[in-house]
Image: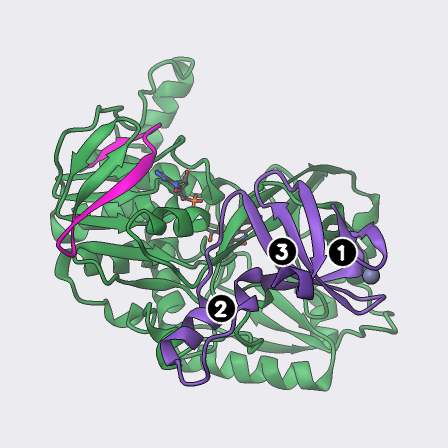
Chain colours: A green, B purple
């Protein structure tokens, strides 16, 4: 089934009764060439690009719950390529280019909206840092514009320009930044992988990884044993537990990140805006709700819900930056589990066990990374070579000191 | 969430700063390079009962808290002397 204007029109006239499920529900086969553990954005994109770019279709994605039920369906959907460090810069640049062609490639409306992202800064020091970051983005071939205070006021008249404590000095404008519909990304990749022959197996929790003489041979699941010569761990917040099944101990600590949404409002916020003096970011969804979030709750957690101090901090930051949101009623809040690394950057690498690969450590920035992560993980699993734009996401970089500490906050998992 | 400080009793979460997993209580030998890599970066990261280190800002006590990372239940708190 392909979507096009005619099929949408026909279905509309026929009462939308003719749509078919977007993917099959196959039972697991006893053996596959490759297995992907985790049916989140990264796992599904990996399967899709293994099939599309490398012609490998004897593959299964094993998901313990339902597809898209993890962080891929819980995030605040910001997509951007404004990274500074070599290693991150080219990777996120590649990812944004894939986003720009994603809907045509998947024949799926992921509602990618390049509405522009503005990072507000509040001091001379922050302006210098923003100028430097903007230059790095331009050098990478992406877009950045340094705005002064009055230029920001023209675009975002509703910010609090009379703030004495955190005065607004200007903003870094990344026009190609924006948002997308998070779960549609999972569904689009799932459908694309399924159409190419990949088996997507839901309600199938991996409970063991079999290793023989240093080589992976398959996995044990709640739906039986499955053999494979290559296995990719793509389980985001649960990575430490899954890797421990193969005896690995990783540089990851799991933390909660909360998100919030208000009642639906008329269009009032046309961009993605971030506050430079506290972690706060906001956009308006197509349904009209203001979607926003802030910092981690800061302590290790696997609960997909946060505590009230985190809520309080985010609300205070929001009110400081744009007092107008005080009138909106908050509808819902929720949390997701973040796989935090000591430098805040991800890992796409082989492990010490032959045939076992790792794609993890996405911290709270893994949504924008989904296309490039899948692309690079597929490249790694198919060729055993790192993809050039992901070659610095090594597992051993903590031991060798080749850290990618984008924020410059030091080696502690919760500080990134 | 409220946490138990050995000096002050049960106090609001906002009075504490999280310092990381109690794995860090055990320091490797000075010349043990891979031990230091493990100490600084790798974590057991359990889903369930865990022990981690918190600093009670008002009184300056380091607390080793035993709690559950899935349910957010807090079980007990000890000074680092007791925890080691
Ligand atoms: C509140 C919040 C806001 C965020 N905002 C942004 C943002 O604005 N921009 C951005 O770029 N990123 C954002 N992120 C981060 C982003 O959502 C994550 O980094 C990314 O979704 C993680 O990768 P994933 O999609 O593969 O994870 P998931 O969707 O969590 O997928 C992992 C899957 O593995 C499965 N699994 C785990 N264990 C097993 C097992 N034993 N067997 C089988 N399956 C298993 C899980 O059930 C899950 O479905 C945010 C995250 C949160 C929670
Ligand atoms: Zn105290």
The quadrant where ligand 2 appears is bottom right
Q: Nearer the viewer, residue A245 or A162?
A: A245
Q: Between marks 3 and 1, how big is the CA–CA gap? A: 15 Å
Residue at x 21%, y 58% (from the top left corner): A353
Of the residues under marks 3 and 1, which one precedes in the sequence?
Answer: 3
* Residue with the mark numbered 2: A342
The image position of residue A25, as x and y in percent, is 27, 24
Q: Secondary structure at mark 2?
A: loop
For mark 3, what is the residue?
A: A299
Using the rendered image of the protein, determine whether residue A288 is visible from the camera's viewpoint: yes
Q: Is residue A214 magenta?
A: yes
Chain for numbered disc 3 = A
Work out whether A224 lies above or below A180: above
Say yes or no: labels 3 and 1 on the same chain. Answer: yes
Quadrant of the rendered image containing residue A37: top left
Which mark lies nearer to you, 3 or 1? 3
Residue A289 locus on image (x, y percent): 66, 40
Q: Residue at x 21, y 60 (%)?
A: A380
A246 is higher (above) or lower (below) than A60: below
Distance, label 3 to label 2, CA atoms, is 14 Å
Q: Which residues are magenta?
A: A198-216
């Amino acid at each position: 089934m392909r979507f096009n204007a005619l099929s949408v029109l026909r279905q509309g006239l026929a009462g939308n009764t003719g749509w078919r499920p977007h993917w099959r529900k196959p039972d697991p086969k006893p053996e596959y060439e490759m297995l992907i553990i985790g049916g989140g954005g990264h796992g599904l994109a990996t399967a899709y690009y293994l099939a599309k770019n490398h012609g490998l279709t004897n593959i299964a994605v094993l998901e313990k719950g339902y597809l898209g039920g993890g962080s891929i369906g819980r995030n605040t959907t910001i997509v951007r390529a404004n990274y500074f460090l070599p290693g991150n810069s080219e990777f996120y640049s590649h990812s944004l280019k894939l986003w720009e062609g994603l809907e045509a490639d998947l024949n799926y409306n992921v509602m990618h909206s390049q509405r522009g992202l503005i990072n507000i800064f509040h001091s001379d020091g922050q302006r210098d840092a923003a100028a430097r970051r903007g230059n790095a983005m331009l050098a990478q071939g992406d877009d950045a514009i340094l705005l002064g205070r009055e230029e920001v006021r023209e675009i975002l008249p509703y910010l609090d320009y009379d703030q004495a404590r955190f005065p607004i000095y200007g903003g870094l404008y990344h026009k190609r930044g924006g948002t997308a519909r998070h779960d549609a990304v999972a569904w689009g990749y799932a459908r694309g992988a399924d159409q190419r022959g990949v088996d997507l197996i839901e309600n199938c929790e991996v409970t063991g990884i079999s290793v023989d003489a240093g080589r992976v041979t398959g996995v044990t699941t709640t739906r039986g044993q499955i053999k494979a010569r290559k296995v990719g761990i793509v389980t985001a917040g649960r990575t430490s537990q899954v890797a421990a099944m193969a005896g690995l101990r990783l540089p990851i600590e799991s933390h909660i990140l909360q998100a919030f949404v208000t009642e639906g409002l008329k269009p009032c916020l046309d961009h993605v805006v971030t506050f430079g003096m506290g972690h706060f970011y906001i956009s308006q969804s197509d349904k009209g709700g203001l979607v926003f979030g802030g910092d981690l709750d800061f302590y290790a957690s696997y609960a997909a819900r946060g505590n009230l101090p985190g809520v309080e901090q985010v609300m205070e930051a929001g009110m400081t930056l744009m007092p107008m949101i005080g009138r909106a009623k908050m509808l819902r809040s929720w949390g997701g589990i973040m796989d935090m690394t000591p430098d805040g950057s991800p890992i796409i690498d082989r492990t010490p066990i032959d045939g076992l690969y790792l794609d993890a450590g996405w911290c709270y920035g893994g949504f924008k990374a989904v296309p490039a992560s899948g692309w690079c993980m597929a490249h790694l699993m198919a060729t055993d070579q790192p993809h050039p734009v992901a070659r610095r996401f090594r597992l051993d970089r903590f031991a060798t000191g080749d850290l990618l500490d984008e924020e410059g906050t030091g080696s502690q998992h919760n500080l990134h | 969430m409220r946490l138990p400080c050995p000096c002050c009793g049960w106090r609001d979460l906002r009075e504490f700063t999280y310092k990381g997993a109690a794995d860090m209580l055990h320091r490797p030998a000075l010349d043990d390079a891979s031990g230091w890599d493990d100490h600084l970066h790798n974590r057991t990261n359990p889903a369930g009962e865990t022990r981690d280190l918190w600093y009670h800002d008002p009184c300056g006590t380091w607390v080793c808290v035993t709690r559950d990372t899935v349910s957010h239940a807090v079980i007990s708190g000890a000074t680092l002397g007791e925890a080691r």
